[in-house]
Image (cartoon, grey):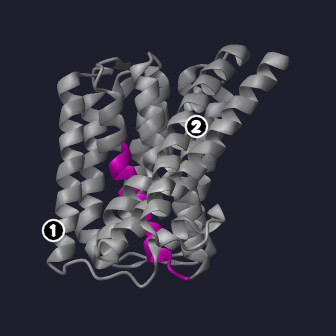
Amino acid sequence: MTGILGTIVLLLGGVGLLYLGAEWLVRGGAGLARRLGISPLIVGLTVVAYGTSAPEFVVGLQAGWTGHGELAIGNVIGSNIANLGLILGLAALLRPAPVPRTLARGDVPVLMVSTLAVMLMLANGHIAIWEAVLLMAMAVAYTTWMVLRARSGRIPEPRFDEAECAAKTTGVQSITTYPRLAFLIVVGLTLLVVGGHFLVQGASGLAKALGMSERLIGLTIVAVGTSVPELATSLVAAARGHTDIAVGNVVGSNIFNVFLCLGSAGLPGALRTLPTLANPDLLALALITLLGLFLLRTERTIQRWEGALLLGSYGGYLAYLILQA
């Protein structure tokens, strides 16, 4: 029992450090970008987007490079399911969520491509090194495309400060000096690395202690734990009446999780799982993504009942995992 409690403490400590690390990294990076005269929109598209995906990136990288491939894959798949079902569902349930035209026409098709990429690459149950490199290249291409769209004026300036939203609960006051901003970035990165190590070790230890698979731990505890920054950002945005940002945060995070997080974790060539057609988790990801694509298909508003449908779908998936375990 003492061993199990120790692994739980390690796991929870890792989640806490990841959350603080992502928050401080976002605050420091966004502040530094502003001091350098970079547009708030570009900051939101790059610093905030990468910052809120940093926990998945760090955990996936450490899991993939230390022989915990199922944990890395489960983290990405579980996080994407949680983003659409839990986070978008809660945000829409809290307040109906408008879908911006630029998102429906630009980013939603990319979300579909990223999900198809996962399904195709895991058709044989293995992500090869060249496939991981391709995913990383797609992450760079997507980021470049977003910045070019923003500079051309096809993405409107935000009405809401995403960086402030993402960093709202850190307790860090407004910081503007270069040394302090640099300190936040360094501390944030350090906390991410340490937190990622604790989370991977705690999750793998808990799986062994309880006789559960790393896949199941990755799909549930680790996935929700690494999605905390997205959850905080989206719910604060929704509470302030800016659910359009919550929608964009979910779509962008899912794209980055596949391209950046899964790609970096797969570079050693050690990611293996069940083939797509025999993998219930990938099929669940495909189904909830199809539901999300239907709701995000045009410039419209996601109603509360649709948010409840997403939330119910996520609850049903969790119930399936529990019954299976």
Give the camera-side residue of 215 and 24: 24
Q: Are marks 2 and 1 in contact (CB under 8 Å)?
A: no
- Magenta region's main secondary structure? helix
The amino acid marked with disc number 2 is Gly
Q: Residue placed at 40% from the left, 24% from the top?
A: 64
x then y, percent, for residue 186: 47, 48
Count neighbours of disc 2 (C-alpha within 10 A) and say few if under 14, some if 14 to 19, many if 20 or more.
many
User: Which region is colored magenta?
Assistant: 241-257
Residue 265 lies, with reference to residue 244, above or below; the image says above
Looking at the image, is mark 2 or mark 1 earlier in the sequence?
Answer: 1
Residue that mark 1 sits on: 148
Residue placed farthest to the right in the image? 1
Element under disc 1 = helix
Q: CA distance from mark 2 to mark 1?
A: 34 Å
Q: What residue lies at 51% left-to-right and 41% top-to-bottom?
A: 190
User: How many marks do you count on the picture?
Assistant: 2
Left/right placement of residue 87 relative to residue 206 reads left
226 in magenta: no
Q: Amino acid under label 1? A: Leu
Return the residue nearer the eye: 240 or 39. Answer: 39
Residue 168 showing in the rendered view: yes
The dot on residue 195 is: 2
